[in-house]
Image (cartoon, coloured by chain):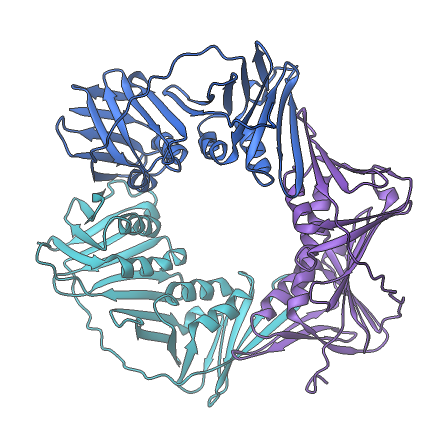
Chain colours: A blue, B cyan, C purple
């Protein structure tokens, strides 16, 4: 039997909003240590990796390892029926072909349960090697989302250049060219508003706007995003899910002649 | 001559929003006792019944009984031109083929009048028998709207089951099945947030989501909705219009083999 | 070299929103005295005239007169990338075929620059004679926008009648007819909420709703609009841009047999 209980169904809503543009369906691997999801996006370009640790749940029980294939649009529809501060309990029998989501309202005597059919999905587990990165940038997640959205209007890809001084995001297209420079913060009063750069050597890489924009759907999860970059290695865009785990996106750089 | 004056044109806006999805046009029957509207919806499935009592108006004069056929989309357009706290006066001559809506702004020296052409509409007055119902449920109108909207995503009809303990709303469809249970409230501090059930015998009936959803367009009128149910009798969904009257919707239950 | 700096990029956003419906592209004439734009709308019916005085800018330098043809949709896209309280600097070399918009964030160490290609536009400078008007109306810009929007739902043109007592806006169409009367304000406590009329002789003129509606896109610029009318002369709708200049729209009255 599998049962996982979380007092804020809003967190699941945000996770689903962050991945349902990239993935139509996905396998949730449940074990004693928690819930894992790893999948290539629908066009097989970027990789999504979600980790929710069992001890971040208010109650967690997983008698046997379980893989549940779910349609994310359906799952998102179900979570949209819950209020943000509803308690959610996810339940499944060991050999079940359905999963149940139960929502309990905080104030009111209202209990909703939704039983959803599970899917059999092909699964390919990709080993993601732990890498030392040339540059690791932490910045406000809202600022990153804003820059990617703004520059996407002018070109199809964004060049990210990181030096000790700061990060430059650039693009160009029919209208003209655009550059946004943010400097490393000197004053670290509010950590969430800081830009910090941990650099071994400068990096300049080019990425497709479309995927960066999809990644920023995770912005509501947390105020800080971390970008890790090295030459010839996929960019890692990481959002922490407070007390529960993290959501990571991987995207290979574009190889362009004029990129240098 | 007919003249009716109300200091809050917002009430009329809300009434129009509550019926204009179901009715393209309707006859307003004006008499000394007030304004009555009764009509089958466009697809002739549900019935709308509106009563506005003359003594709920700030001024009311009706020399002769008058039936005014109005296009509700046009009428709604006109009311949308008023501010919520404008005073509205509805005026018509006895044998008029037009009606005039006059709006007066509270603060400013602004007077707007809109003259609208009346329509000749066929009218069938349906006698609605007063019935004793097996179950009468009072619940927050917003909660009812939310449940109907949520469940409509999963199926085409909703089963409403009422017992002494509470009410269960259920549906099922391609994605799976959904149940929402609300219990009768024990603590009656805030009447508007209570769920109360007056039950002679338990009832389980099935209704089309589409119509229930249209009825909930009346939610802004009042915080409480009343659902009255008996076997083989139309459901009555009633919204009180404070100090002025009420809006009732009637909908026959679906007869389904698997319902019981 | 040309350089103009303004601490509130929001003003430029509002100006662009106010003209980009009427004009696809426009020439900005820059001189020592400031920036001028004058152009017929895309359908060559109304005239837009914008004046931004050099001394309203926080920094202004124009070595040589310069005419910059810009695509307003592109320019608007660029300004939408700025935050409202960003400082904007507009820069161009004397013989440049590009213009640069640089935005500096107030709080954060973020600098964005957008380089946009300039266009060669045909220009026709129209002499606009200074006229004495029969009626000059000042009224809340939001109220004017509301009236024009409301009446546009009922007819294609609006009759504006001005007398000493007040202003009447009228229209009629398939649904019926509409009149909105606003009276001259007697109590001048809040200037921005006043209606004031400076009248030599009464005027009644008819204008196309479509253009009046486009003009009201300037409403966010300032709380007061000024309407100047005389028989057989274009209406002038003027919005002051505080400390910086003004935006004027000119529209010839419709000649209708039933107008009088």
Q: Quadrant of residue A101?
A: top left
Q: Residue at x 21, y 20 (%)?
A: A61
Q: Position of residue B34 (x, y in %)?
A: 39, 76
Q: In the rendered image of this protein, does residue C174 appear above or below residue B221?
A: below
Residue that appears at 60% across and 70% down: C151
What is the quadrant of the C terminus of chain A in the image? top right
Residue sticking out furthest to the front = A257
Locate residue A48 relative to residue C1 in the image: left or right: left
Split into 4 quadrants, where in the image is the N terminus of chain A? top left
- What count of labels does the image hold? 0
Using the rendered image of the protein, determine whether residue A88 is visible from the camera's viewpoint.
Answer: yes
Nearer to the camera, C176 or A177: A177
From this view, report whether residue B111 is shown above or below residue A257: below
Residue C230 sits above or below residue B260 on the image: below
x and y, in percent, of residue C99 in the image: 76, 40
Q: Quadrant of residue A59?
A: top left
Q: Is residue C176 left or right of residue B150?
A: right
- Relative to residue B169, is residue B51 drawn left or right? right
Along the viewing direction, whichever of C3 and A251 lies nearer the viewer: A251
Q: Position of residue A2 (x, y in %)?
A: 19, 24
Q: Residue furthest bottom?
A: B95
Using the image as rendered, state which of residue C39 and residue A75 is in the foreground.
C39
**How far from the left and from the top, in percent, is residue A79?**
32, 38
Write the residue at 24% across / 63% down: B236
User: Can the viewer see residue B33 in this picture?
Assistant: no
């Amino acid at each position: 039997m599998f049962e996982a209980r979380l007092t804020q169904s809003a967190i699941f809503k945000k996770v689903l909003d962050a991945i349902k543009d990239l993935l139509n369906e996905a396998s949730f691997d449940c074990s004693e240590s928690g819930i894992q999801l790893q999948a290539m996006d629908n066009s097989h370009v970027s990789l999504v990796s979600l980790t929710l640790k069992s001890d971040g749940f208010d109650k967690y029980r997983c008698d046997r390892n379980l893989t549940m294939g779910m349609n994310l649009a359906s799952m998102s529809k179900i979570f949209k029926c819950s209020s943000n501060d509803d308690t959610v309990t996810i339940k499944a029998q060991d050999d079940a072909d359905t999963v149940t989501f139960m929502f309990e309202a905080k104030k009111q005597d209202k209990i909703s349960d939704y039983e959803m059919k599970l899917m059999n999905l092909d699964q390919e587990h990709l080993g993601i090697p732990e890498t030392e990165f040339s540059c690791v940038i932490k910045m406000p997640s809202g600022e990153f989302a804003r820059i990617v959205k703004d520059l996407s209007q002018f070109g199809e890809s964004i060049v990210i250049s990181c030096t000790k001084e700061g990060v430059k995001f650039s693009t160009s297209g029919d209208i003209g060219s655009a550059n946004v420079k943010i400097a490393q913060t000197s004053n670290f009063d509010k950590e969430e508003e800081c830009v910090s750069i941990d650099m071994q050597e400068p990096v300049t890489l080019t990425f497709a706007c479309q995927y960066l924009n999809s990644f920023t759907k995770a912005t509501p999860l947390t105020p800080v995003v971390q970008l890790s970059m090295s030459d010839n290695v996929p960019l890692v865009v990481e959002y922490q899910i407070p007390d529960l785990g993290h959501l990571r996106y991987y995207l290979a750089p574009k190889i362009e002649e004029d990129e240098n």
